[in-house]
């Protein structure tokens, strides 16, 4: 019996990992769209009940707005789609670790889970204020990290 329970838990974790990769690929597509628009290539997807409720990428250049980060755009779109400001039952997939501003907004939105691909050692919230998220928010890092980091590296190499 113990073996069957462990086997089911392992299968659930594998299924979750497949879903995480699927949604992170969508976030990576958004990051590529941002790069195509000469925006810093960060993409975000918010999922509720296994369904995408928001997709976004950075729009800081187009909107001339330093707050128009992918996460902020996704939070607004998800809240509109769901008809409420709290995202307790949602997961945010984002290609780069959120900055402190975005982490604060995610805390206010009470996001249920954050999955990010690659860390941001200089401006990521874990380096600046690791406890700024809502206490119930689950955090997972490193899903498709190499792919996300490569998009960012390529973008900034072209800029130099």
Image (tube, grey):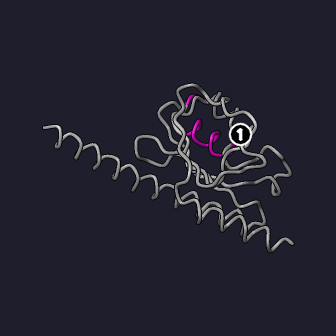
Q: Is residue 150 above or below residue 20?
A: below
Taking the image as shown, residue 157 lies to the left or right of residue 44, namely: right
Q: Position of residue 83 (x, y in %)?
A: 54, 32
The residue drawn where x is 76% and y is 47% is: 68
Q: Residue at x 67, y 34 (%)?
A: 130
Quadrant in which the N terminus is drawn: top left
Judged from the image, the secondary structure of the residue bearing numbered disc 1 is helix
Is 29 colored magenta in this rendering?
A: no
The question of residue 81 being in magenta is answered with yes
Query: Which residue in the rendered view is the most extreme toward the top?
Result: 135
Q: Which residue is mark 1?
A: 125
Q: Which residues are magenta?
A: 72-86
Q: Residue furthest front?
A: 2
Q: Report the residue at 83% width, 46% height from top.
A: 66
Q: Is residue 4 above or below residue 58?
A: above
Direction from residue 100 to residue 109 in the image, left or right: left
Quadrant of image for the C terminus: bottom right
Residue 99 x %, y %: 73, 43
Across and down, in percent, residue 106 comes to 64, 34
Q: Main secondary structure of the magenta part?
A: helix
């Amino acid at each position: 019996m113990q073996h069957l329970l462990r086997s089911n838990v392992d299968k659930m974790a594998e299924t979750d990992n497949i879903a995480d990769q699927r949604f992170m690929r969508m976030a990576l597509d958004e990051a590529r769209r941002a790069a195509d628009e000469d925006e810093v290539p960060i993409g975000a997807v918010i999922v509720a009940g296994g369904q995408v409720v928001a997709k976004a990428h950075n729009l800081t250049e187009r909107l001339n707005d330093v707050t128009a980060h992918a996460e902020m755009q996704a939070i607004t779109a998800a809240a509109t789609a769901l008809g409420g400001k709290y995202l307790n039952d949602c997961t945010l997939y984002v290609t780069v670790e959120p900055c402190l501003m975005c982490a604060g907004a995610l805390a206010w939105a009470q996001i249920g889970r954050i999955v990010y691909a690659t860390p941001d050692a200089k401006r990521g919230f874990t380096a600046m204020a690791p406890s700024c998220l809502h206490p119930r928010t689950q955090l997972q890092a490193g899903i498709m990290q190499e792919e996300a980091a490569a998009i960012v590296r390529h973008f900034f190499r072209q800029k130099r």
